[in-house]
Image (cartoon, rainbow, N blue to C red):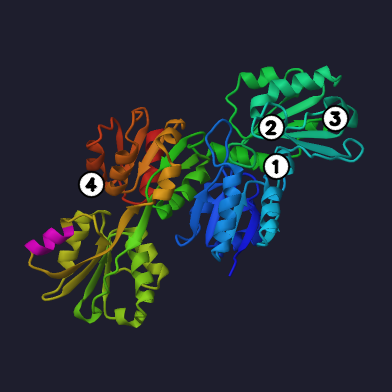
Amino acid sequence: MTGKVYLIGAGCGEADLITLRGLKKLIDSDVVFYDALVDEKIINNLSQTVEKIYVGKRYNQKSMPQEKINEILVRYAKEGKTVARLKGGDPFVFGRGSEEAQILEQENIEYEVIPGISSAIAVPELAGIPVTHRHLSRNFTVLTGSSVGVNNDEDVTPINYQALTKLGGTIVFLMGYHHIAEIMNNFIAAGMNENTPCAIISKGCTKEQTTIKGNIGNITIKTESTNLKAPIVIVIGECVNFDLKSNTNNIEESQTLENKNFKDLKIAVTGTNSFVEKLRAKIEQKNAKVIDWGFLDVVCSDELLPDFSEFNWIVFTSQNGIEQFFLKLKREHKDIRLLSHLKFAVIGSGTADKLLEYGFYADLIPNNFDSETLTKELLLKLKTNEKVLIFRAKEGSDLLINTLNDAKIKYQDFQLYELKENTEKKSIISASNIKSFDVDYLVFGSAKGVTTFFDNFNTDFDNKIKVVCIGQKCAQALNNYNVSEILIADKYNIDGIIECLEKNEK
């Protein structure tokens, strides 16, 4: 049976600009083919069971040919899979979605188009520029920058600058990053007044959005002295003179920035998707840019859970362990009431909060959030002949195990999960990609994260980057790679990392 293809617009910029319908179809898909400008948070929050394939195109970078994309869309659909083709903006606005729809029709494959918010409208809008305004601009024209330069891969229809000049209204160029000077010179040559307002908007609809305003006569010089980042949107016309952003919002924004000290910092985060997203949520509140360099998946053990009736205590050394335990409990069809007689010890407050999400209060939370303190305080709590069940990562610390052995405490060490490399995501986070980022901090949440990162990308690591880690074991792993500046969080959780960053930024 042939599957179905959804041509979905992700919207522009931030992840929450995707439509509800688009998000639902993504969640229900078997495979997602996604483009370069799709916010990584959309992809990272999909289930691990969804196959994710990057097919993005960027200027002057090697990319998958459109014919190959068409071919694999058809192949996966004919295998009976539900396929999502996720594009930045709207599928039919310079996204080649119409070409893919034609191929699907030719192959008699069912498909559905789900619109997205186009950057042609949304980016100017969030910069305070309406593309239409009564009595000023009754029309707008949208063009692509690929129509300006030479492109050997496709037939390009030349732009009629004289016609555009006479037409008036608002003119919007997408993907014009490398052609600003050429566009402006062509309009001036076509007779457009050099004082015609013009805006260049970089990284629109994101926290990094930057707007430079001028006119077509001086905008090129203005942008040459700045460090603009692609993608950009070029807006030309009288509507550029508007600045329709709420005064209230502007006041609140300036007050917020005064109270936050991470502004303009770029913080790369390694580890599991869960760790990256939790840290991102807190760091982005402080107006920092988070770069996802995490490519570790949490993989649960196939070993069956033991008989809980034999034990008096359960020890969890991580939030990952709690999540995997309760998922495994469900998969093995074990009743949660089997845990009613047990006491729970956890390594810290974050782990205790995660346990509480499943309806259990922790009986022991150590004063210091580390294995050594947990072990000492657990020994004080244990009664004679009580038995301990420990759930931890395969490559976790052996401190607790060794101490229980020395104290002749009865226990079972259950290695519940391990961290494995996600090869698909690792291929996207290439060494060349890492070098291209000007990063201020690099955050590690585990020793495993350290070894996997450096073993894959230890090519000319920039020692100007400050490295933040959780715990001494993580720091010891970093020492093996000659990292010059290591900051260790006092608390071994997300809040500890935030506090460590704050302390270093004062």
Residue 110, given in percent of the width and then of the height, sits at 67, 63
Q: Nearer the viewer, mark 4 or mark 1?
A: 1
- Dominant secondary structure, magenta: helix
| Secondary structure beneath label 2 | helix
Q: Amino acid at mark 1?
A: Phe
Give the Cα distance between marks 3 and 1: 19 Å
Number of marks in the rendered image: 4
Q: Looking at the picture, does residue 222 appear above or below residue 96?
A: above
Residue 253, given in percent of the width and then of the height, sits at 62, 40
Give the Cα distance between marks 3 and 2: 17 Å
Q: Earlier in the sequence, mark 1 or mark 2?
A: 1
Q: Amino acid at mark 4?
A: Lys
Which mark, residue 94?
Answer: 1
Which residue does the numbered mark 2 point to in the structure image? 146
Q: Which residues are magenta?
A: 400-406
Residue 71 placement, left or right of 201: left
Q: Amino acid at mark 3?
A: Leu
Query: Residue 123 falls in which quadrant of the image?
Result: top right
Which residue does the numbered mark 4 point to in the structure image? 473
Magenta region includes residue 249: no
Give the Cα distance between marks 4 and 3: 63 Å
Q: Earlier in the sequence, mark 4 or mark 3?
A: 3
Q: Earlier in the sequence, mark 3 or mark 1?
A: 1
Q: Looking at the picture, does residue 315 appear above or below residue 384?
A: above
Which residue does the numbered mark 3 point to in the structure image? 164
Residue 118, given in percent of the width and then of the height, sits at 71, 45
Q: Earlier in the sequence, mark 2 or mark 4?
A: 2
Magenta region includes residue 401: yes
| Secondary structure beneath label 3 | helix
